Amino acid sequence: MPLASIFEHMIFPIKNLLLYFLIYSFIVGCSTSIEDISSNVGVIGDSAMVASAHPLASQVGVDIMRKGGNAFDAAVAVQFALAVVYPRAGNIGGGGFAVIRESNGNIASLDFREKAPSLASKDMYLDINGEVIQGKSTVGRLACGVPGTVDGMYRLHEKYGSMSMSELIQPSIFLADQGFILTADEAQNLNRFQEDFKANNSWAIPTIKETAWQEGDSIYYKELAVTLSLIRDMGRAGFYEGIIADQIVKDLRRGGGIMTMEDLANYESKWREPVVGQYRNHKIISMPPPSSGGVALIQLLRGSEKYSFDNWGHNTPKTMHAMIELERRVYADRATYLGDPDYYEVPQEMLLSDEYLEERFSDIALNKKTDSKAIKEGIEGAIESVETTHFSIVDPFGNAIAITTTLNNYFGNKVMVKGAGFFLNDEMDDFSLKPGVPNQFGLIGAEANAIAPNKRMLSSMTPTIVEKDGRLLMLTGTPGGATIITSVYQTILNVIDHGMTMQESVNAKRFHHQWLPDKVLFEEGGFDPKVISELTELGHNLELIDGLGRMDCILVMEDGKLEGASDITRGNNTSLGF
Ligand code: GLY
């Protein structure tokens, strides 16, 4: 189809820019629907809630449910809206995972993780000496996996949707075409990546600006609006076949990319059995491999059961030490045993069995740390901070969905598809490029996560739903690469063990350990110097970090109302409900 005729697909039911600005001002100015930082309770809704990384995306989800749509309709609309208003991680050029609980208690999980192109090979990021070529798997056209998001949204809708796909995509087309106003954080983020945008796109793209972006600037993604219109009108074929697929392949070829039209046409998301575990009489429902998140989270929680964290206190040296020691062992397991179950026999049952966990955690001593190298040999690497994004939705019918979705790094591989207006992922870096050598998150992998054609790379994304006494209790999840699992773990302990509200749990300062590198990251401003010195005395190596995670969670309170809690202290995340 010629590009000119694509414009025939553009339909804007609401063309009034002024109306849009009024809606936006209402969202950011309405004190009853945005959390107050000093408040220890989040946003309360009678029956519906959306918690996401951006106020406009949360508003899109709420609008869909007000029109009678269910949580799954809202999730599709929010995912597409985030691709516009939160392009650092929201996406159509990436992938993700959804964990679902219907009002009748049925559970499911959807894997729309990216796949390696069919021409990928185990050593594709190694030089002739067998060493990893730095940057090749993180930036540019060889870093990209076959995107899963658009297929995932169509699969989700086909099984659970009640409104038309066209109604669900329309709000994102409107936002892309009519533009929106940048927050200070978004302007700063766009400024930070100007050099990368220019280096990887030799033509004008909407995120490049000669003078610095400022808070209050408007940004427009006109080409993305056209792409979204094609998807709306042609279904998944609008993305995986025809002009957009052609543009993706051509653009990637420009810089040594290996994705083919067949790779795109053949992409399929997969329904998988969620991983389920128990923690102090709560049912934990999370994402199975190819995410490591669910298995690792349940291992951590099961290991926590023998400790009295409630009596020991929140973020005290004793509680933190035990948690760190559990994390050390669980991340070593992650590196050894986890990968795409379609390619590698993941010993999930063994890893979650009582016998294995009893033995695995039996050498934890409460009076000294274990040396990570004594658990398993490894090589140290760096840890990066936030990327990826998570959202949680509950609808008035009682359905719940938690989605974590990613381009991997901020703005993925920094390549915006020419003429199509969206960023592609750099998810290939989540493979183990060379067993024993850490990726950008410092995570080490083994054969289980080696690169193979059409295989899915291991993830840490941990969208999770918690039930108590057979009823929905909590939805949680966050970005943060390797730190996702420990942030989700802490959020659950904060509510179940420490009796916090959802907002207190999200606000609470976090820490992280991942076996290697053998250090404890802790957030600035929340840990008593006495706690730090006691942990140091136990042998831990502590390091300050700016922030860990950007959670978007929902708690069903005892009276049945919903508490939406977004990470307002760490980002522009926003809960909105009714
Ligand atoms: N790209 C981060 C993750 O999937 O864990």
Image (tube, grey):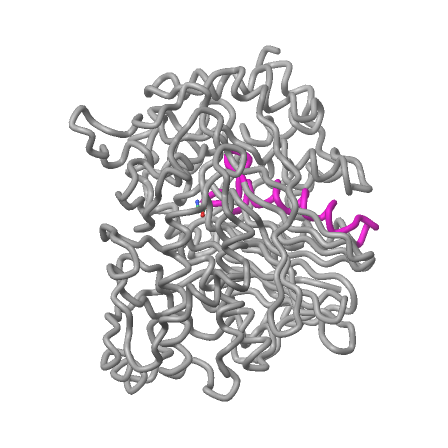
Horizontal and vertical percent position of residue 30: 64, 67
At horizontal 45% and vertical 65% (from top left) the residue drawn is 570
| Nearer the observer, 256 or 300 | 300
Residue 80 lies left or right of residue 46; in this view the side is left
Horizontal and vertical percent position of residue 212: 34, 46
Q: Which image quarter: residue 342? A: top right
| Nearer the observer, 114 or 392 | 114
Q: Is residue 222 placed above or below 258 in the rendered structure?
A: below
Which residue is outermost to the left? 129
Q: Is residue 367 placed above or below 61 in the rendered structure?
A: below
Residue 175 among magenta residues: no
At horizontal 54% and vertical 54% (from top left) the residue drawn is 294
| Nearer the observer, 492 or 399 | 492
Which residue is outermost to the top? 2
| Nearer the observer, 440 or 309 | 309
Residue 511 lies left or right of residue 235; in this view the side is left
Residue 74 among magenta residues: yes
At horizontal 40% and vertical 39% (from top left) the residue drawn is 449
Which portion, as a residue range, is magenta?
Answer: 66-95
Q: In which quarter of the image is the N terminus?
A: top right
Residue 304 lies left or right of residue 378; in this view the side is right
